[in-house]
Image: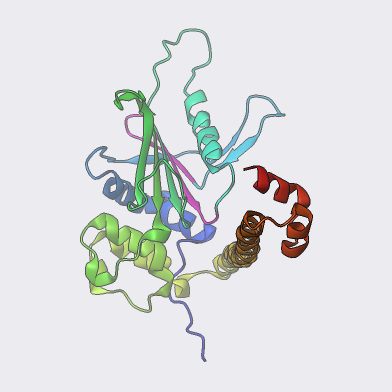
Amino acid sequence: MKQVEERYISLLTDFGFKRIFGTAMNKDLLICFLNSLFNGRQVVKDVSYLNPEHVGDVYTDRRAIFDVYCEGENGEKFIVEMQNAYQTYFKDRALFYSTFPIREQAPKGNDWDFKLNHVYTVALLNFSMNEDAFDKEKIRHHVQLCDTATHKVFYDKLEYIYVEISKFNKTLEELDTLYEKWLYALKNLYKLTQRPKELCDKVFDRLFEEAEIAKFTPQEMREYETSKMAYRDIKNSVDTAKREGIEIGMKQGVEKGKHEANTETAQRLLAMGLPAEQVAKATQLPLEIIKNLGNS
């Protein structure tokens, strides 16, 4: 089968995501996406891009590198990240990252009343987070510091927004809002061979112009290919781990089934009055387990 050549970049790659959302010339795209995400709760009128690389207070401190880091016109800070694979301490990482824009607000010197500007962490997840605190039916999850008894917001200037784009499966014909159109583009832009009528909003003019691979310089093309290879390596590793996990789970399930069947057989034999030693030999279960069954 002949492979179809991509016309547009993948926004799931590091290169594609930062090209569209992490450059000053494309800040209108980031502003539009954030406003569609906030849906009126917060209105972003303008942003200034900040240094995405942060180092701790001393040389031994850990380093944090954000995909996109910017500041709103009122001093609010936005961290926007694309994450393609689950990490064991992903929530800890998000919390750790959010401390940098908090700490950097402290001015040099002693005169400061500790007033902080808003900090938003937006994490776009190309995987299912399987978080117990989240509604499994929803894609967008909004996290704040709340009182556990009243469920009222205790501190409203630190927010985490997780978007599980891997769960977004609407077709072009089903897209209703600008937010849904952005999610579709994030997940499927690289699959398109031409611009669909459903993405005819003026803001997407810039998106399709910047995403067209044919307009890349040789250097940009090399960077994109490298980024695409890195993305594929991540996804292949995840897919392999899933397959191995399924195989292990199936094997464990078979073994568990055998054990449960043998246990039931042992209980019946013991009820018939057979000695524990004979039951152990017949079922191949340890004698200690047979004795425990006899005493239960």
Q: Residue lying at the far top in this picture: please name it.
A: 110
Left or right, residue 279 beside residue 119: right
User: Residue 79: where, in percent of width, then height?
Assistant: 45, 40
Left or right, residue 139 beside residue 269: left
User: Residue 60: where, in percent of width, then height?
Assistant: 72, 29
Task: Name the main secondary structure of what is drawn in magenta.
Answer: strand
**Magenta span:** 68-85
User: Residue 220: where, in percent of width, then height?
Assistant: 55, 65
* Quarter occupied by residue 273: bottom right
Nearest the viewer among 228 and 46 is: 228
Identify which residue is drawn at 38% across, 25% down: 117
Nearest the viewer among 74 and 120 is: 120
* Quarter occupied by residue 201: bottom left
Up the image or down, 8 lies above or below 106; here it is below
Identify which residue is drawn at 41% across, 74% down: 191
Q: Is residue 96 magenta?
A: no
For residue 243, say whether it is visible.
yes
Nearest the viewer among 287 and 146 is: 287
Up the image or down, 249 lies above or below 92; here it is below
Q: Residue lying at the far bottom in this picture: please name it.
A: 1
**In this figure, what is the number of numbered marks?**
0
Identify which residue is drawn at 47% across, 26% down: 102
Up the image or down, 253 lies above or below 50; here it is below
Which quadrant is the C terminus positioned in?
top right
User: Residue 174: where, in percent of width, then height?
Assistant: 23, 67
Up the image or down, 230 lies above or below 45; here it is below
Nearest the viewer among 49 and 128 is: 128
For residue 158, say whether it is visible.
no
Identify which residue is drawn at 62% across, 66% down: 254
* Quarter occupied by residue 54: top right
Q: Report the colour scheme.
A: rainbow
